[in-house]
């Protein structure tokens, strides 16, 4: 399932995606805003390649290499200039997103980052642009659910982040802790398949405990566990993911994996408890066992 999110940042610094999208102009020969930043970071070869494309119409998209940028491709799309709303601006903005995704798809791109197209120099009202952007991407993803792993907006300021986050929450719902929604459909929408290379796990400290506990899981519960979970805010929240039959449970953004649970087919599972030495003084196995069972009730 695709992970759709908005983050605060500079799109030229995104190394976790295969492609970034440029909010260009019809000449494709560079400009200000995010376009200028992308050309500066990519180096002059990007302009060289853009010259061979002979421009791009509003709402359409073309693709180039990324040169010195940390990703592989740049998709160039041309957003509409805001002229009051009666000049097909909405439709053209929607086309930017759809055509960018189609062009990316043809190159086998699975992770892509967008800027907030048209809301800078081109003056498209921010909330309206965010609504169209997120809706267009969601419709595309609904029609092609297996095509992308990550589609994100890299927002340059808080106001833009807020606008896109609001729309994403509206369409995808907000994942809540510690009670997972009863409604299965909503619960599934909030789940993304967590990838193990999204963060760094620190080496296990010398002091750690190991114990076993008994519990059985239905195949459906196992499937849910296998998807993993990342809360929207990472600070002081649980997140987990599975690799093979082993579940890694982290809390917050620290690199320490607190519980490593190796599931065994005979129902006797092994837990390794991993304390971050400065935060946890001692391990009381009964307490850990209780907590793990509570967490598994919630996660499975
Ligand atoms: N990373 C992410 N977002 C950025 C960055 C960055 N490094 N820099 C700016 N933004 P704009 P448009 C944000 O004006 O409205 C150019 O001259 C910015 O804060 O770049 O589609 C082109 O050549 C805003 O939220 O694009 C065209 O002539 C968003 O990116 C024209 O501007 C879009 O702002 C296109 O105008």
Image (cartoon, grey):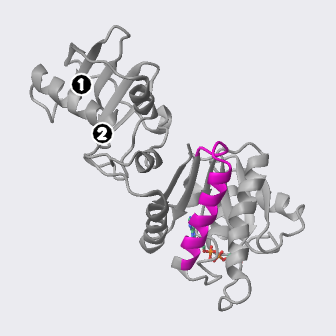
Residue at position x 47%, y 20% from top? 244
Nearer-N-terminus badge (1/2): 2
Q: Is mark 2 within 8 Å of ligand 1?
A: no
The disc label shown at residue 254, or none: 2
Q: Where does the C terminus fall, quadrant-wise?
A: top left
Q: Taking the image as four quarters, which one is ligand 1 found in?
A: bottom right
The CA distance from mark 1 to mark 2 is 12 Å
| Region rendered in magenta | 128-149
Q: x%, y% of residue 280?
A: 13, 32
**Location of residue 201 (image quadrant):** top left
What residue is shown with label 1?
Answer: 274
**In this rendering, would 168 be left or right of 24?**
left
**Location of residue 227 (image quadrant):** top left
Q: Secondary structure at mark 1?
A: strand
Q: Main secondary structure of the magenta part?
A: helix
Q: x%, y% of residue 197?
A: 49, 34
* Viewer can see residue 231: yes
Q: Residues within 10 Å of mark 1 (few under 14, many from 20)?
A: many
Say whether marks 1 and 2 touch (CB < 8 Å): no
Q: Where does the N terminus fall, quadrant-wise?
A: top right
Q: Is mark 1 within 8 Å of ligand 1?
A: no
* Viewer can see residue 276: no
Q: How many marks overall?
A: 2
């Amino acid at each position: 399932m695709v992970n759709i999110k908005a983050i605060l940042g500079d799109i030229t610094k995104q190394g976790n995606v295969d492609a970034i999208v440029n909010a260009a102009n019809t000449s494709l020969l560079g400009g200000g805003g995010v376009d200028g930043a992308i050309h500066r970071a990519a180096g002059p070869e990007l302009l060289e390649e853009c010259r061979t494309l002979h421009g791009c119409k509003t709402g359409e998209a073309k693709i180039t290499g990324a040169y010195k940028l940390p990703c592989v491709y740049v998709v160039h799309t041309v957003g509409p200039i805001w002229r009051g709303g009666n000049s097909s601006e909405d439709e053209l903005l929607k086309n930017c997103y759809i055509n960018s995704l189609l062009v990316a798809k043809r190159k086998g791109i699975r992770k892509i980052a967008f800027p907030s197209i048209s809301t800078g120099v081109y003056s498209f009202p921010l909330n309206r642009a965010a609504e169209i952007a997120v809706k267009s991407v969601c419709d595309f993803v609904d029609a092609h659910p297996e095509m992308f792993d990550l589609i994100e907006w890299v927002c340059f300021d808080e106001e833009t982040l807020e606008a896109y986050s609001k729309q994403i929450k509206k369409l995808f719902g907000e994942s809540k802790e510690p009670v997972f929604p009863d409604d299965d459909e909503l619960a599934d929408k909030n789940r993304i398949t967590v990838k193990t290379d999204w963060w760094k796990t620190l080496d296990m400290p010398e002091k750690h405990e190991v114990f076993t506990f008994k519990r059985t899981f239905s195949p459906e519960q196992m499937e849910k566990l296998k998807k993993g979970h990342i809360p929207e805010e990472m600070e002081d929240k649980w997140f987990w993911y599975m690799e093979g039959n082993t579940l890694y449970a982290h809390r917050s953004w620290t690199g320490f994996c607190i519980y490593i649970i190796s599931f065994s087919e005979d129902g006797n599972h092994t837990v390794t408890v991993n304390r971050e030495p400065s935060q946890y003084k001692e391990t009381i196995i009964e307490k850990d066992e209780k907590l793990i069972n509570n967490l598994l009730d919630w996660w499975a």
